[in-house]
Image (tube, rainbow, N blue to C red):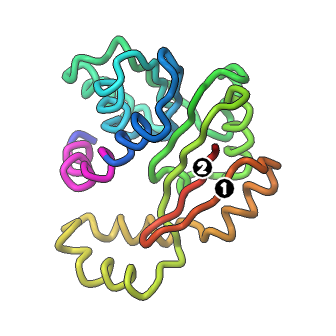
Amino acid sequence: MEQYSEKVKKMLGGEYMEMVQRIAGEINPPEGARLLEIGPGPAWITIWLVKERPDLNIDGLEASEDMIRVATRNAIEAGVEGRVRFIHGFVETMEPLESATYDLVYSHESMHHWVDPVAGLRQVSRVLRPGGRLLIEDSRRDLGPGATLVVNLLGSLVAGKWVRHWKASIAASYTPEEVAGMVKAVGRLDWRVKKNFMGLSIESG
């Protein structure tokens, strides 16, 4: 887990910081807002976000107890352990978290790991406060020719021996149309599914 933590920090640090800046800048949660990250892994996004916005209170719901151990260590080393909390659990069964609690729920590259995405999205909807925001980013399975070329030709240069995990994540992910069907099943008319060159997102507001 420690090796994975440092590898993704180096390999995906730019993506992580883009999400941090988007949340801190574009979404701009109100002062003292409470946030939830689904699947924080080693928690670099949450750690960097709370350093950018020390007024935020952030919970991270993580399925792996080993990853929680690494994330906790990372938070301590970054000096932010008092402003983040990691909770062991799964998005589909997070009933212990109170309803209408969070001003923003966000996730980066975890949705394709969810056992039941519709159940998970229903839980996300439940824990959001009225008017709360959502930002879920993930891979998309239906990559176009250009993106497929990037993965196949440049994947080894970008990800090294981890390229097979990258390809497996893409294969396990969903198409924008499939995700739109999930959002429709949840009944959230204010959530939009967007796609880009390499991935997709579910956003509100």
Q: Is residue 59 above or below residue 24?
A: above
Quote the CA–CA distance across marks 1 and 2: 5 Å
Q: Secondary structure at mark 2?
A: strand
Q: Quadrant of the C terminus?
A: top right
Residue 169 in sight: yes
Residues tagged 1 and 2 counted as in contact (Cβ below 8 A)? yes
Q: Is residue 21 or residue 145 the one in the foreground?
A: 21
Crowd band around label 1 with a 10 angstrom C-alpha radius: few (<14), some (14–19), many (20+): some
Q: Is residue 198 left or right of residue 61?
A: left
Residue shown at 52% from the left, 63% from the top: 200
Majority secondary structure of magenta residues = helix
**Residue at image x 63%, y 60%?**
193
Q: Give the number of the disc on residue 192.
A: 1
Instruction: Give the magenta range.
Output: 3-17
Q: Is residue 5 magenta?
A: yes
**Residue closer to the observer: 184 or 75:** 184
Q: Is residue 70 visible?
A: no
* Residue 203: numbered disc: 2
Residue 169, position as x, y percentages in the image? 44, 64
Task: Tell me if residue 203 comes above or below residue 48 in the rendering.
Answer: below
